[in-house]
Image (cartoon, grey):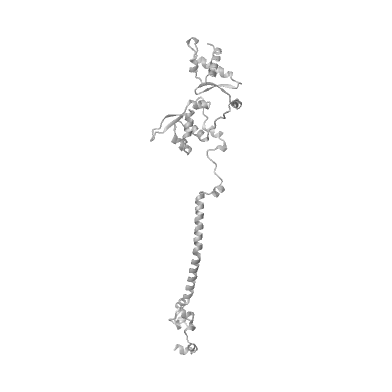
């Protein structure tokens, strides 16, 4: 059968199918009498792909086979045919899916170790329901964690033929939006210094400092009285101390005249001395 005869048959089969079709599946459309081989089907597909140049659809080969699909440059208008908004996936789901795609097979604990957070069970369940990932085995470690890998449905959804068509990580870093960086930029030093480390701890420390200040204010009068009492005692003991430090033969020393005088007597000497005795001759008094 000629290529021009094969083209409309293959095109109609691809448009009627709800799933991509491989060359082997397209070959099942023909019997031995048609004498159609896989090489002829491949050439017909190549010709059909060339015919799509300049049109709104394209013939694309994905992991599951060949399919017709809308071109990316006209998708904005075609998407208005459906009232349902396209699904928007969370950043956590996309990060987990990217780790599985680039590091497969990988376990859930390994994903959590790389991301630094716990992987939600809903994320794993959503990807399994969409048939993007599947369990490909179990790690031979305690607990036997499941190993996750991507499926053909994952490649079909992202318009890929194989994992080799994934963009390299270097290109992903170049395309990364500065506002969507994985590592947040550090705050300026002034702002970091002004931010409280623990508001609750700061509040507790403030309460403790206020309590200490109250205790100090309460004890201050007593300490002041004690200080005054010490000053009074020191003043009372001053004459005695000075009398002990003076020389025994000094005429100006009170202890030389009254060696046994007490502090009260020293403070009020006229109270215990008779007036007549005070008028006696100093020589007689010394004799």
Q: How many marks?
A: 0
The image quarter in which residue 75 lies = top right
Q: Nearer the viewer, residue 172 or 209?
A: 209
Residue shown at the point (46%, 88%) measured from the top left: 285
Q: Is residue 89 above or below residue 200?
A: above
Residue 102 visible in the displayed image:
no
Q: Nearer the viewer, residue 13 or 243?
A: 13
Name, please, the residue furthest toward the top.
33
Q: Nearer the viewer, residue 48 or 251?
A: 48
Name, please, the residue furthest toward the front.
83
The image quarter in which residue 180 lies = top right
Residue 2 on image: x %, y %: 54, 11
Residue 12 on image: x %, y %: 55, 16
Residue 26 on image: x %, y %: 50, 16
Instruction: Point out the image quarter for the C terminus.
Output: bottom left
Q: Is residue 214 above or below residue 20?
A: below
Residue 266 visible in the displayed image:
yes
The image quarter in which residue 139 lies = top left
Residue 73 on image: x %, y %: 60, 26
Q: Nearer the viewer, residue 173 or 97?
A: 97
Residue shown at the point (49%, 9%) measured from the top left: 33
Q: Is residue 26 above or below residue 202?
A: above
């Amino acid at each position: 059968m000629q290529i021009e005869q094969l083209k409309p048959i293959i095109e109609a089969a691809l448009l009627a199918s709800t799933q991509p079709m491989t060359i082997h599946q397209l070959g099942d459309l023909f019997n031995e009498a048609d004498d159609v081989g896989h090489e002829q089907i491949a050439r017909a597909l190549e010709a059909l792909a060339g015919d799509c140049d300049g049109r709104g659809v394209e013939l694309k080969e994905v992991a599951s086979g060949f399919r017709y699909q809308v071109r990316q440059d006209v998708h904005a208008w075609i998407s208005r045919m459906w009232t349902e908004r396209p699904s928007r996936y969370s950043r956590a789901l996309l990060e987990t899916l990217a780790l599985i795609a680039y590091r497969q097979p990988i376990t859930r604990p390994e994903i959590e170790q790389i991301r630094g957070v716990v992987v939600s069970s809903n994320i794993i369940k959503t990807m399994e329901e969409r048939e993007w990932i599947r369990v490909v085995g179990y790690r031979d470690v305690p607990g036997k964690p499941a190993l996750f890998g991507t499926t053909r449905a994952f490649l079909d959804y992202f318009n890929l033929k194989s994992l080799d068509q994934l963009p390299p990580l270097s290109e992903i870093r170049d395309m990364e939006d500065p506002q969507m960086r994985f590592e947040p930029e550090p705050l300026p030093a002034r702002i970091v210094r002004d931010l409280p480390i623990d508001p609750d701890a700061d509040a507790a420390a403030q309460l403790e400092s206020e309590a200490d200040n109250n205790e100090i204010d309460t004890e201050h009068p007593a300490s002041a009285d004690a200080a005054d009492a010490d000053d009074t005692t020191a003043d009372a003991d001053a004459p005695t101390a000075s009398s002990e430090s003076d020389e025994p033969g000094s005429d100006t020393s009170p202890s030389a005249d009254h060696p046994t005088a007490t502090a009260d007597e020293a403070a009020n000497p006229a109270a215990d001395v008779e007036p007549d005795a005070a008028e006696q001759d100093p020589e007689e008094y010394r004799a």
